[in-house]
Image: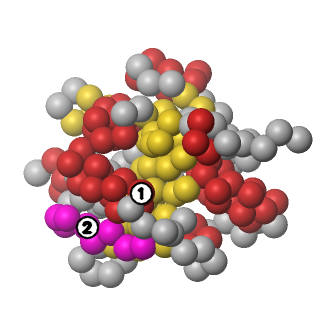
Amino acid sequence: MRRRCYNSLMTRAAFILAGGRSRRMGRDKALLEIGGEPLAARAARIAAEAAGRAVLVAPAALYGRLGYPCLDERFPGLGPLSGLDAALRSGLATWCLLLACDMPGLDSASLRSLLATAENSDCDAAVTVSAGGRLEPLCAVYHVRLAPLAEQRLLERRLALHDLLSSIRWTPFPAPHPAFAANINTPEEWAQWNR
C-alpha cells in the first residue's frame, strides 16, 4: 500500500457540501439564488478566493452546470461526515475547508483567517464558534490526517460531526460577524435573509 505524502498535496482547498436533502426548506437550498447566483456557486466562488480552489461535494449530474468540479461521496446518504470523508480522501489538499452551501454570509477575508488559524495551529482542525458559543463544524478546516478516523466513524455509523470533534484536537475560530456561519434551513429564514 502506498503511503500518501502530505507535502505533495496542495496546501488548501475548499469543499462545499451541496447534495443535502433540504427537507425543511422544501426545495434544493444549493440552487436558491442571491443576485442571480445559486448559493452553492456563491459559496464556491468565495471559498475559492480564500483557498485557491473549490469543489462541490455533490453529484455532477445535478450540480455540474454550476461551473465547479464535483466530487462524489463514498458513503452517500450518511450526512455531512460523508462529505468530509470525500474531501479528506480527494487527494487535493492537506487542509480541507469544509462549508455548507447554505451560508450566505460567508466572506473570503474571514475564510482566509479561518484557514490561517488551522495552518498555524498544532491541531487537527479549526472550527468556527458563533458569538453564542455554538460550534459550526460545517464552517471549519480539517487536516487530511483525519481521513482514517472519519472513515471509521462512518463504518460504525457514528455520524455526528460534533462527536468527531470531541475526539480530536481542534482550535476555535471566533465568528468575525453574526452572519458569517449562519445557515438557511427554512423558507422563513430565507425570507428573513432576503429582507
Using residue 60 as the reference point, say whether residue 43 is left or right of it. left
- Kind of residue sitting beneath label 2: Ala
Using residue 85 as the reference point, say whether residue 182 is left or right of it. left
In the orientation shown, which residue stands out farthest toward the right? 1
Magenta stretch bounds: 171-178
Q: Nearer the viewer, residue 129 or 105?
A: 129
- Secondary structure beneath dot 2 equals loop
Q: Is residue 181 magenta?
A: no
Residue found 73% across the figure and 47% down from its top: 75
Q: In this view of the protein, can residue 193 be seen by the observer?
A: yes
- Quick one: label 2 or label 1, which is nearer the N terminus? 1
Neighbourhood count class around disc 1 (C-alpha, 10 Å): few under 14, some 14–19, many 20 upward: many
Disc marking residue 150: none
Counting from the top left corner in percent of width and height, residue 162 is at 55, 73
Real-space Cα distance between discs 2 and 1? Answer: 17 Å
Where does label 2 land, which residue?
Answer: 175
Quadrant where the N terminus lies?
top right
Using residue 41 as the reference point, say whether residue 26 is left or right of it. right
Asked whether disc 2 touches disc 1, contact meaning CB atoms under 8 Å apart, the reply is no
Counting from the top left corner in percent of width and height, residue 140 is at 43, 59
- Kind of residue sitting beneath label 1: Glu
Q: Nearer the viewer, mark 2 or mark 1?
A: 1
Residue found 54% across the figure and 41% down from its top: 93
- Secondary structure beneath dot 1 equals helix
Quadrant of res 160:
bottom right
Quadrant of res 188:
bottom left
The number of discs equals: 2
Counting from the top left corner in percent of width and height, residue 92 is at 56, 35
Where does label 1 land, which residue?
Answer: 119
